[in-house]
Image: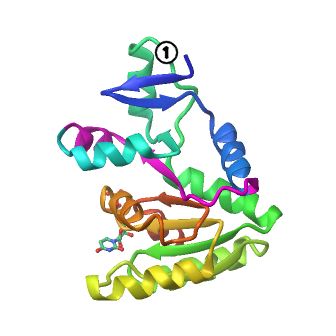
């Protein structure tokens, strides 16, 4: 079996490298539907037990990664082990590295304005081959949303990186998935604070 179920969520047995290869394949496909990557941390797994909407979002996701050593350790007790942890933050760094070589495009949504601005400056400097199609801070009102969704759609990035906290990022991605025109969307928690803080 290629999956290990943890509290009802099937985690695929993929290493970081295999996860990046899978995402590369998604980028190379002509598929128009947004591919949602959920970083499955203990918080999300626990929330899914009580939140049916979140559970549905995770079930529909293209990829659920083992976000944290706890998930990997539990998988060993559950009789099928996950090869390694694939955290949102580590995945983002790998995608930036690979994107630097391949010219992948990104849009960054989330974190406060100063962090968002600085994160983009740092990424441009560190990964000059990455194409940054836009960014927006994460403290917007519901009235701002249509404009932001349109801005992302016009940018049509390979990757939409959403740092709004979990599970808000997952719900935001899901509720706008047909309008975003990004190939892949990932909720990454506090990763932009690490890059831009
Ligand atoms: N954030 C945001 N808008 C909000 C609330 C939070 O953009 O309304 C950002 C916050 O600045 C931080 C990220 O979302 O960059 C949340 O990080 P946290 O570590 O709390 O996320 P978690 O690890 O819980 O998913």
Instruction: Report the residue at 39% width, 40% height from top.
Output: 59
Residue 124, given in percent of the width and then of the height, sits at: 69, 79
Q: Position of residue 43 (x, y in %)?
A: 29, 45
> For residue 129, what is the image quadrant?
bottom right
Residue 75 image point, x, y percent: 43, 22
Magenta stretch contains residue 44 = yes
Where's residue 76, x and y in %? 45, 17
Residue at 44% in and 70% down: 193
Check the image and report above or below for 83 versus 56.
Answer: above
Q: Which residues are magenta?
A: 28-49
Residue at the (52%, 36%) spot, across then down: 85
Quarter containing the N terminus: top right
Please report the residue visible at 52 percent of the width from the left and 66 percent of the height from the top.
161
Q: Secondary structure at mark 1?
A: loop
In this rendering, position of residue 187 left or right of residue 106: left
Q: Seen in the image, is 26 located left or right of residue 146?
A: right
- The residue indicated by pointer 1 is 80
Pick whichever, 156 or 20, lies toward us: 156
Q: Judge by depth and name the residue closer to the eye, 33 or 195.
A: 33
């Amino acid at each position: 079996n290629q999956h290990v179920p943890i509290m009802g969520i099937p985690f695929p047995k993929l290493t970081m490298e295999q996860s990046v290869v899978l995402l590369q394949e998604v980028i190379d496909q002509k598929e128009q539907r947004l591919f949602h990557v959920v970083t499955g941390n203990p918080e999300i797994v626990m929330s899914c037990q009580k939140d049916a909407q979140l559970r549905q979002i995770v079930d529909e996701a293209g990829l659920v990664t083992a976000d944290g050593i706890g998930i990997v350790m539990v998988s060993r007790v559950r009789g099928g082990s996950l090869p390694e942890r694939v955290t949102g933050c580590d995945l983002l760094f790998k995608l930036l590295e690979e994107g630097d070589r391949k010219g992948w495009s990104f849009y960054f949504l989330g974190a406060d304005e100063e962090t968002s601005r600085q994160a983009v400056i740092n990424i441009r400097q560190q990964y000059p081959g990455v194409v940054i199609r836009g960014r927006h801070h994460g403290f917007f009102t519901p009235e701002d949303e249509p404009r932001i969704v349109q801005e992302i759609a016009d940018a049509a990035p390979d990757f939409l990186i959403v740092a709004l906290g979990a599970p808000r990022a997952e719900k935001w991605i899901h509720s706008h998935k047909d309008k975003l025109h990004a190939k892949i969307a990932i909720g990454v928690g506090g990763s932009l604070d690490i890059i831009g803080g």
